[in-house]
Amino acid sequence: MIVKTVPVTKYLTINAYFYIDEKTAGGVLIDPGAEANKLLQVIDDNQWVITKILLTHGHFDHIGAVKQLVEELKIPYYILASGQQYLTDPQFNLSAMTGDEIVLSEACYLHDGDIVNLFENSEASLQVIAVPGHTLDGVIYYDAANSVAFAGDTIFQNSYGATHFPGGDFTQLMDSIKNKILKLPNETILYPGHDAATSVMAEKLNFK
């Protein structure tokens, strides 16, 4: 499996991730927050077939390039069902603060426990694990076979996501981290929405 991190920036720097099955050159794009043309160039340069866009939550810095990418690649995008308000309300997705409001429609909705296949001919898949707290719709995408989880803004290296935005809840966030993320195997690599990757083992030291 290939994990390619592409930092994209408009108002904030966000890690957009490609998760690609080497055998088929097919896969998914996670959290394309900005710079759609840059991401399209990465796809073209590698001759990858991207089948879907996955969102870890609906904040503006994670969804900013979705509209252009969906139109140009002609693929669906997915978010947890509780993320609908973030897509349609610039106050909830925080884009209202930037003066460049984002409103999205026609999402495909996921539920806790769903399995997302990377590519139609691939056995590789990601499990959807709901982790509310940073937002109402927070999820991680977990590949148990390859010990990888894409964690969005729920947990960072030596830190965790903010809870003072709409839908945030500190108690929920701590529960999500301690009882879902940190219950994954120690060797699981966590790829967060911002900054460097970490691991379950490393983060257990911060949440005793």
Image (cartoon, rainbow, N blue to C red):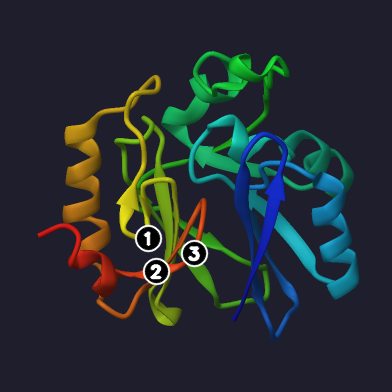
**What amino acid does circle 2 point to?**
Thr
Pointer 2 local density, CA inside 10 Å: few below 14, some 14–19, many at least 20: some
Position of 195 relative to 12 (above/below)? below
Q: Is residue 183 visible?
A: no
| Mark 3, residue position | 196
Give how far across and how far down residue 67 sits, in percent. Answer: 77, 34
Do the numbered discs 1 and 2 sit on residues whose CB atoms are within 8 Å? yes
Element marked by disc 3: loop
- Name the kind of residue labelled 1 in the image: Gln
User: Label 1 near label 3: C-beta < 8 Å?
Assistant: yes
The picture quadrant where one finds residue 18 is: bottom right
Residue placed at 23% from the left, 56% from the top? 180
The quadrant holding residue 123 is: bottom right
Question: Which numbered circle lies on residue 169?
Answer: none
Residue identifier under label 1? 157
Question: What's under tag 3, amino acid-wise?
Answer: Ala
Q: Which quarter of the rendered picture does the C terminus lie within?
A: bottom left
